[in-house]
Amino acid sequence: MAIETYIRAKDENRPHLMPAAFAPDANLEIKVETGNISFPPASKGIEAITQVLVRDFGRVNENLYTFCLDKPPTDATTDFRCRWLVGMSDKETKSIRVGCGYYDWQFGADELVQQLTITVTTMLVLSSNHHRQVMNWLCHLPYPWCPAETASSAMPPISELSEIHQFLMHVGTEPG
């Protein structure tokens, strides 16, 4: 499935997997509603998308874990929205980033991604002191499809994660 292939390509820094997820003429839109991270707002074509989501992202981040927090789509789905949770560490500073938001997927007849809109609602930066707790939490979650309740109940008691906890507790896939 294209979603799992994309997550694997991004999290494992494997750009060669992207053509198995995205159509050659795919579109990417990224809406950032928070600080602490930036992306180009739009990219067109598999090469540009791969540069933004895999190569550039992997250049500065490591220990990536991305989770889709809703049930996988059926094979016949052409439009799919799901919440996501991501955690990673900065290669240089060793700080931890934990974020969440929404993926809006549109698939073509070939089941490849034709359009992806990523909405980043929250991106927190925690000190490297939290590395062990956060990575231990993330590496034990079901991957890449993880019920939000599972992620929430296993979350370490770090006060800085309260905004993520609130997002995980929100039932459904609509923002707000």
Image (spheres, rainbow, N blue to C red):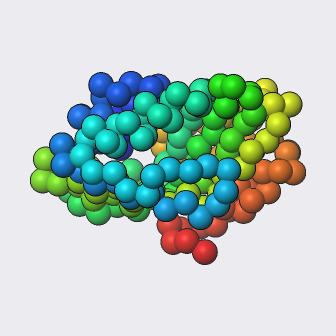
- Give residue 27's quadrant in the image: bottom left
Q: Position of residue 166 (x, y in %)?
A: 72, 62
User: Relative to 83, is 1 above or below?
Assistant: above
Q: Give the residue furthest to the front.
A: 40
Q: Give the residue furthest to the left.
A: 109
Side of 113 relative to 9 (left or right): left
User: Relative to 154, is 44 above or below?
Assistant: below
- Give residue 51's quadrant in the image: top left
Q: Residue at x 55, y 71 (%)?
A: 175
Side of 150 relative to 8 (left or right): right
Q: Position of residue 28 (x, y in %)?
A: 34, 54
Q: Residue at x 85, y 45 (%)?
A: 158
Q: Position of residue 7 (x, y in %)?
A: 43, 37
Residue 101 visible here: no
Residue 53 visible here: yes
For this rendering, which residue is in front, 38 or 98? 38
Q: Position of residue 39 (x, y in %)?
A: 50, 50
Q: Residue at x 27, y 37 (%)?
A: 47
Image quadrant containing the N terminus: top left
Image quadrant containing the C terminus: bottom right
Numbered circles on residues, count: 0
For this rendering, which residue is in front, 145 or 161? 161
For this rendering, which residue is in front, 69 or 31? 31
Q: Residue at x 69, y 25 (%)?
A: 92
